[in-house]
Image (spheres, rainbow, N blue to C red):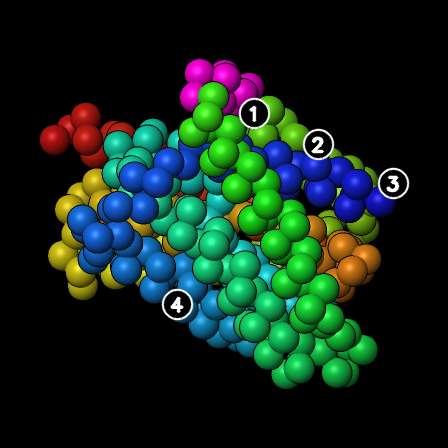
């Protein structure tokens, strides 16, 4: 089974669901509280790719895995970050704004950054990136579903809320299905590479979360804003990374998607631990 036929509907539904939750006033936060939005954007769009490049270099990743880990770092924030922010008693409005902003910005930054990364390391692995195809795929699979979701949410608010309640419950099982199918198809490679690649990705996530906390300190953000920045920088859209890696229009290489599968697992584990620690600290205070 080609995993692209599973991940495409998942990504489209996730983006549509994101659109359902967005309203024009969500973007007013950029003007009302620019510092936390700027901190989150810097963390996701600038720092995370730099961290991923450094970690990938230190761990001497193969070209395919290096491309995979850079693809994760370039992807927008995960749609479930809003739920994690709520559980961590973070700033949910900020989380929604950052997820929306990163989804829009990365439509254009992913092709640019990945074109540079592929040109830097892809020659030896005979990997080429059709930038135009990637840009068009991002617009069709991300921008269009988001815009449709926004339109549905504004015109039929009650129906949009009901659809959102269904989709947010279906998102995690769908990702588990994708991970299971992918693991079955690539079991030997994943098992063999997990000790080193799993450690590499764990370090990436921990450094991403730490950089989010550092940015919050530098920008003098509140506790709720800090928790949200940590989650937003630490949680990326693994479904998009898998789509780009597996798409016949872009890389058409499932090996490049393996880091995203491992990332999805470790990201949820580490952020659940973070949320649990924050809730425990809150109870003690």
Q: Residue at x 52, y 73 (%)?
A: 53
Bounds of the magenta span?
A: 157-166
Local packing at callout 4 (Cα closer than 10 Å; few below 14, some 14-19, many 20+) is many
Local packing at callout 2 (Cα closer than 10 Å; few below 14, some 14-19, many 20+) is some
Kindly identify which residue carries mark 1: 167
Is 261 on the left or on the right of 282, as rendered?
A: right
* Marks 2 and 3, the one that precedes in the sequence: 3
Whole-percent x, y for residue 241 in the image: 62, 54
Any magenta on residue 8?
no
Point out the frontmost of discs 4 and 1.
Answer: 1
Give me the C-alpha separation between circle 2 and circle 4.
Answer: 31 Å
Kindly identify which residue carries mark 3: 1
Whole-percent x, y for residue 275 in the image: 34, 35
Kindly identify which residue carries mark 2: 177
Kindly identify which residue carries mark 4: 47
Is 227 on the left or on the right of 81, as rendered?
A: left
**Cβ–Cβ below 8 Å for labels 2 and 4?**
no
Point out the frontmost of discs 3 and 1.
Answer: 1
Looking at the image, residue 94 lies above or below residue 152: below
């Amino acid at each position: 089974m080609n995993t692209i036929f599973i991940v495409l509907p998942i990504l489209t539904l996730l983006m549509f669901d994101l659109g359902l939750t967005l309203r024009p006033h969500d973007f007013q936060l950029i003007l009302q509280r620019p510092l936390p939005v700027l901190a989150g954007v810097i963390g996701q769009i600038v720092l995370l790719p730099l961290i991923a490049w450094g970690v990938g270099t230190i761990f001497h990743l193969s070209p395919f895995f290096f491309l995979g880990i850079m693809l994760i770092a370039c992807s927008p924030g995960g749609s479930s970050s809003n739920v994690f922010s709520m559980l961590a008693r973070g700033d949910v409005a900020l989380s929604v704004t950052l997820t929306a902003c990163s989804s829009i910005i990365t439509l254009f930054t992913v092709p640019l950054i990945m074109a540079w990364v592929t040109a830097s390391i892809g020659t030896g692995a005979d990997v080429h990136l059709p930038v135009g195809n990637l840009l068009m795929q991002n617009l069709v699979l991300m921008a269009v579903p988001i815009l449709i979701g926004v339109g549905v949410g504004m015109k039929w608010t009650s129906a949009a809320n009901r659809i959102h309640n269904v989709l947010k419950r279906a998102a995690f099982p769908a990702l588990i299905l994708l991970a299971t199918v992918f693991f079955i198809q690539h079991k030997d490679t994943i098992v063999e590479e997990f000790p080193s690649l799993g450690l590499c990705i764990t370090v990436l996530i921990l450094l991403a979360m730490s950089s989010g906390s550092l940015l919050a300190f530098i920008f003098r953000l509140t506790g709720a804003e800090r928790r949200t920045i940590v989650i937003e920088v630490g949680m990326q859209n693994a479904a998009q990374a898998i789509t780009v890696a597996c798409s016949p229009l872009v890389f058409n290489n499932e090996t490049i998607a393996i880091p995203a599968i491992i990332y999805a697992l470790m990201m949820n584990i580490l952020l659940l631990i973070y949320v649990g620690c924050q809730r425990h600290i809150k109870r003690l205070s």
